[in-house]
Image (spheres, grey):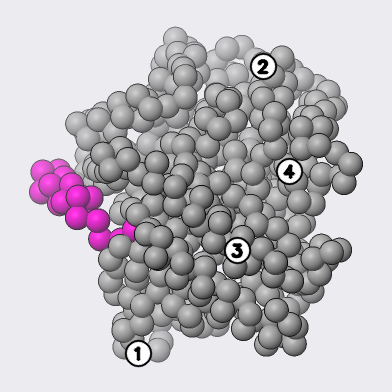
Amino acid sequence: MSQSTHVFHRQLAKRPPVAVSGQGIWLRDAEGRSYIDASGGAAVSCLGHGHPDVIAAMHRQIDQLAYAHTSFFTTEVAEQLADLLVGSAPAGMSHVYFVSGGSEAVEAALKMARQYFVEIGQPQRRHFIARRQSYHGNTLGALAVGGNEWRREQFRPLLIDVTHVSPCYEYRGRLPDETPEAYGQRLVAELARTIEELGPDNVMAFVAETVGGATAGVLTPVPGYFKGIRDLCDRHGILLILDEVMCGMGRTGTLHACEQEGVVPDLLTVAKGLGGGYQPIGAVLAQGRIVEAMRQGSGLFQHGHTYLGHAVACAAALAVQQVIQRDHLLTQVRDRGAYLASRLRDELGDHPHVGDIRGRGLFWGLELVQDRATRQWFEPSLKLHARLKSAAMEEGLMIYPMGGTVDGRCGDHVLLAPPFISSEGEIDQIVARLRRSLDRVVSDIGLTS
Ligand SMILES: Cc1ncc(COP(=O)(O)O)c(C=O)c1O
């Protein structure tokens, strides 16, 4: 194959390998090299690649009907998927709005929040509060609520004004003499002050990833944090939008990550694991009273895209979710997740450049540091995360490393999100290859491991 390309790739300096096939947790490129998909791409491929039941469901749908625009029709498959999602949703969720991915889900949720307040006669509410170091997508609304400085910087003049508070980032945020619970309440108090400053009646929603993902490397909430946030939002009539595009749909061991926090959001965004990468699909799950306000008010949600509720995407997602239920894969996520955690701790727990190992289910992050004792990060110009990604690819391992963990500029982490079907033997291989890749990178930059 020629080296020139007309594809506007993510990186313009070099062309990525050409993926040609996938089976289970393995991908193969055109040169015949195999890679273990230890990150599910970006926490997407929950069933791995080439799952026969999902492919068969997609074939059936294509043969019957590939596409019907949602301003004319609904489809059986979209109705069935919505039934399944509402049937397994947190209490009070009555409807599902289907979109084509995570950013679209977040955009839709932001606009639902705004329209809800207009419909119920509170049009003065116009502020979103979100968290630093969060990621909610790359479209302008989602980028505005996101808190990653590097991603926002050059687009700042285009972004709506959003107020950001501290993330729940125990490794760097909790004081040495503070309990996790006290740390969580300190963060809730910070949000309370921010709400007071903006005027409680002017705030629409607090937006947060239940378990932080891409930009800070799997930030798990401390006990009581989200309960405190939920109470605060209720006190002021503010909506809680939980973004589970990455951490949801079983990734952390429960279908929705918020189940483990004992809170129910007003709007819940999901994507990635919903369709497992077989088709682009995302969704917003909405509380009944939000939908009801629109039904009794203007009678519509003033939004829409051409591919809402695409029939083949819904068929793929329905099949993915049915396989997860049928094969009891959430139990497997919890079991294999515990195994992955123990293997990571055994192999990398004492590594001089692994500062923190954190996660839930099959969603794990390792924060990399130059010095474990001081938690000093690597010099950002070293681009440790990029070196690690290349070294891992050479080892035949797909992982999801990122820089800017600490503040958008400094710090490095690596995220692991293997498919739910990974075996213990495959997890052993993931951890061994990760260790070799990390050792190679630190030795290349003249450090020891
Ligand atoms: C929490 C979260 N929200 C939104 C998005 C954006 O999703 P997409 O890339 O499908 O637009 C992501 C993607 O990583 C995400 O992790």
Residue 108: x and y in percent read: 50, 35
Q: Say above or below: 362 vs 70.
A: below
Viewer-closest of 76 and 244: 244
Residue beneath the point at 50% across and 47% down: 361
Q: Is residue 293 magenta?
A: no
**Residue that label 4 marks:** 167
Quickly name the residue at label 1. 2
Q: Which mark is residue 346?
A: 3
Q: Position of residue 117 (x, y in %)?
A: 60, 19
Residue under pointer 2: 234
**Residues under numbered marks 1 and 2 in contact, where contact means CB atoms less than 8 Å apart:** no
Question: Quick one: quadrant of the C terminus?
Answer: bottom right
Mark 3: secondary structure:
helix
Farthest residue in the bottom direction? 2
Q: CA distance from mark 4 to mark 2?
A: 20 Å
Q: Residues within 10 Å of mark 3 (few under 14, many from 20)?
A: few
Which badge, 4 or 2, is on the more N-terminal residue?
A: 4
Query: Disc 3 or 4, which lies upstream in sequence?
Result: 4
Q: Are marks 4 and 1 in contact (CB under 8 Å)?
A: no
Taking 269 as reference, is 385 left or right? right
